[in-house]
Amino acid sequence: MAATKRWLNELEGSLNDQVLDDAAELSARIVQDEEAQSRLAAMFGKK
């Protein structure tokens, strides 16, 4: 089972730190947008 999970992670790129770093950077840029902030506030009840 562990070998299968490692193999699947390798195939999808989960073991590649650059892929995860790029995703985190993109997420950070998106949530800085005013519209995103408004939607998050509406979803979580804060502003």
Image: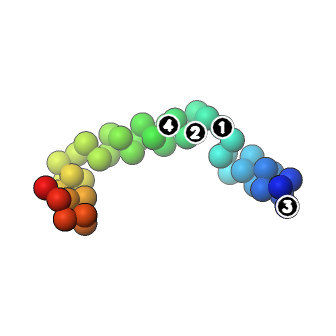
Asked if the residue at tag 4 contacts the one at tag 3, i.e. Cβ–Cβ closer than 8 Å, the answer is: no
Residue that label 1 marks: 16
Q: Is residue 46 visible?
A: yes
Q: Is residue 5 above or below residue 15?
A: below
Residue that label 4 marks: 22
Q: Position of residue 42 (x, y in %)?
A: 19, 65
Q: Name the kind of residue labelled 1 in the image.
A: Asn
Q: Position of residue 3 (x, y in %)?
A: 86, 53
Q: Name the kind of residue labelled 4 in the image.
A: Asp
Q: Name the kind of residue labelled 2 in the image.
A: Val
Q: Residues within 10 Å of mark 4 (few under 14, many from 20)?
A: few
Asked if the residue at tag 1 contacts the one at tag 2, i.e. Cβ–Cβ closer than 8 Å, the answer is: yes
Residue that label 3 marks: 1
Q: Residues within 10 Å of mark 1 (few under 14, many from 20)?
A: few
Going 39% across and 45% down the picture, which residue do you hit?
27
The secondary structure type at the circle numbered 2 is helix
Q: Name the kind of residue labelled 3 in the image.
A: Met
Q: Residues within 10 Å of mark 3 (few under 14, many from 20)?
A: few
The secondary structure type at the circle numbered 3 is loop
Going 25% across and 58% down the picture, which residue do you hit?
40
Q: Is residue 33 above or below residue 35?
A: above
Which is more N-terminal, label 4 or label 3?
3
Distance between the alpha carbons at the discs numbered 2 and 1: 6 Å
Q: Nearer the viewer, mark 3 or mark 4?
A: 3
Which is more N-terminal, label 1 or label 3?
3
Asked if the residue at tag 1 contacts the one at tag 3, i.e. Cβ–Cβ closer than 8 Å, the answer is: no
**Residue 12 in the figure: left or right of residue 31:** right
Q: Position of residue 10 (x, y in %)?
A: 75, 46
The image's mark for residue 19 is: 2
**Residue 12 in the figure: left or right of residue 22:** right
